[in-house]
Image (spheres, rainbow, N blue to C red):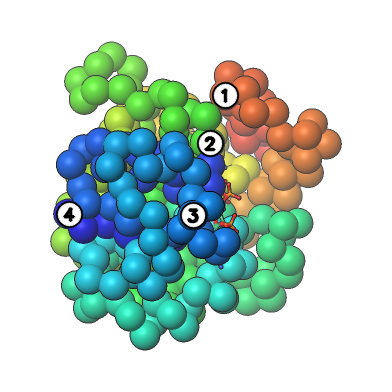
Amino acid sequence: MKIGIIGAGAIGSVLSKKLSANGHQVIVANSKGPETVPAEALAFGATAGTTKDAITDKDVLIISIPFIQINNIAAIIKENIDKRTIIIDTGNYYPVRDGSIEEILEGKPESIWVSEKLGRDVVKAWNSVVAPVLKNNGYPAGMQNRLAVPFTAEDDNSTAVAKQLIEETGFDPFYVGDLQEPYRFQPGQPSYSTSLNLADIKKAIEQAHTSSNAALHREEFIVTMMKLGWPDDAKTMVEISRFLNNKQVN
Ligand SMILES: NC(=O)c1ccc[n+]([C@@H]2O[C@H](COP(=O)([O-])OP(=O)(O)OC[C@H]3O[C@@H](n4cnc5c(N)ncnc54)[C@H](OP(=O)(O)O)[C@@H]3O)[C@@H](O)[C@H]2O)c1
């Protein structure tokens, strides 16, 4: 597939590396320009380009940037994207980083907000996996206790493509539902950053805090992680996430 990735940070670089290693033709872009895209993103044949290069003539566009930055790329996406291109968003809304987005704080689901900005449906995927786990804990299909990645999508074609790409990054895909549902695996939920296999992720999604409580759990998760300085060690992140995200805040 021809895949564009906007965002060459912790998540975008790993996706670029893994998807190009799987034979896809990947172009990856950041905001500072192609010459600043990290070498890791280009390790297996992906090329660095402009944001427009990452959008134009693609089967899939992956957006992996700080959530609020959607506002800054919406226009260029609308102007240059093909009808056939499937958009996948890895983003999480962090009020402390992204500022107040009133519509979301008042209850609009994040993916609906993104899809309205872009004028298109979006798939949500990989957002519940922290960067060191995405990088280091992808395993071949069939391996015991392979970890699972929940995702949402609106139609059969984007569901099939998301499944294939999640597989290729080394995780079992688990379809959760449509664009109303990503709150079930956002920060603060039992499936967020807890490194679960397919059987356990199904249970964690069923046990998700309700949509009206999800923001409270997100807040507790983020505030605690900030106070701890966001450990970059995967094992510690997973242990803390399992403890925090399975607690009842109220
Ligand atoms: N890190 C994690 O563990 C993790 C896990 C799951 C989901 N997520 C979510 O995934 C998204 C990306 O996270 P990350 O950790 O990879 O972020 P990151 O390391 O901070 O990287 C962000 C990337 O986005 C680029 N970018 C920012 N604004 C842009 C714009 N207007 N146009 C083009 N590129 C732009 C940056 O490029 P420049 O540096 O050139 O500005 C950078 O390459 C976030 O929404 C995050 O919440 C993160």
How far across and down, in percent of the image, does residue 117 sit? 48, 79
Q: Residue at x 24, y 77 (%)?
A: 82
Task: Indicate which disc, 3 or 4, sits on the residue closer to the N terminus.
Answer: 4
Task: Indicate which disc, 1 or 2, sits on the residue closer to the N terminus.
Answer: 2
- The quadrant the C terminus occupies is top right
**Which three-letter amino acid code belongs to the residue tagged 2?**
Val
The residues tagged by marks 3 and 1 sit, at their Cα atoms, a distance apart of 29 Å
Task: Tell me whether the residue at label 4 lies in contact with that at label 1, contact meaning CB atoms closer than 8 angstroms.
Answer: no
Q: Residue at x 31, y 47 (%)?
A: 46
**Above or below: residue 112 compared with residue 125:** below
**Which three-letter amino acid code belongs to the residue tagged 1?**
Ala
Q: Residues within 10 Å of mark 3 (few under 14, many from 20)?
A: few
Residue that mark 1 sits on = 234
The residues tagged by marks 4 and 2 sit, at their Cα atoms, a distance apart of 25 Å
Residue that mark 2 sits on = 130
The residues tagged by marks 1 and 2 sit, at their Cα atoms, a distance apart of 8 Å
Q: Nearer the viewer, mark 3 or mark 4?
A: 3
The residues tagged by marks 3 and 2 sit, at their Cα atoms, a distance apart of 26 Å
**Residue 171, visible in the rendered structure:** yes
Task: Indicate which disc, 3 or 2, sits on the residue closer to the N terminus.
Answer: 3
**Which three-letter amino acid code belongs to the residue tagged 3?**
Glu
Task: Tell me whether the residue at label 3 lies in contact with that at label 2, contact meaning CB atoms closer than 8 angstroms.
Answer: no
Residue that mark 4 sits on = 1
How far across and down, in percent of the image, does residue 224 sit? 78, 37
Mark 1 lies on a secondary structure that is: helix
Task: Tell me whether the residue at label 1 lies in contact with that at label 2, contact meaning CB atoms closer than 8 angstroms.
Answer: yes
